[in-house]
Image (tube, helix red, strand yellow):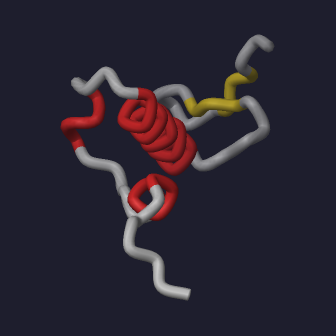
Amino acid sequence: MDKKHKSPSTDLAGRTYDVSDYKKSDELSQGLAMTHEQASDSLTEGTIDGKIENLEGKDIDLPR
């Protein structure tokens, strides 16, 4: 069985984040930008326990 037309899902699967996604208004670009920001924030802070370091290096609990 030969497929002559690519389905939109195969085009989406190959799409990766680009800096310009922050300025675009389509749903895919906005989703990639948001996911990139969340991943970047997680990598920057490095924890999931709701704590952040102050300037002196002490952990501060973040209110939930």
Q: In this rendering, is residue 57 above or below 39? A: above
Q: Nearer the viewer, residue 30 or 11?
A: 11
Residue at the spot 44% in from the left edge and 43% down from the top edge: 36
Q: Which image quarter is the C terminus in? A: top right
Residue at the spot 73% in from the left edge and 41% down from the top edge: 48
Residue 42 locus on image (x, y percent): 56, 43
Residue 56 locus on image (x, y percent): 51, 31
Q: Nearer the viewer, residue 20 or 44?
A: 20
Total numbered circles: 0
Residue at the spot 52% in from the left edge and 46% down from the top edge: 39
Q: Quadrant of residue 5?
A: bottom left
Q: Is residue 55 visible?
A: yes
Residue 16 locus on image (x, y percent): 36, 56
Left or right: 22 as drawn, with respect to 46? left
Residue 24 locus on image (x, y percent): 26, 26
Q: Is residue 37 visible?
A: no
Left or right: 22 as drawn, with respect to 12? left
Q: Quadrant of residue 62?
A: top right
Residue at the spot 56% in from the left edge and 87% down from the top edge: 1
Q: Nearer the viewer, residue 7 or 42?
A: 7
Left or right: 6 as drawn, with respect to 58? left
Q: In this rendering, is residue 8 above or below 62? A: below
What is the residue that sits farthest to the top in this orientation?
63
Left or right: 44 as drawn, with respect to 49? left
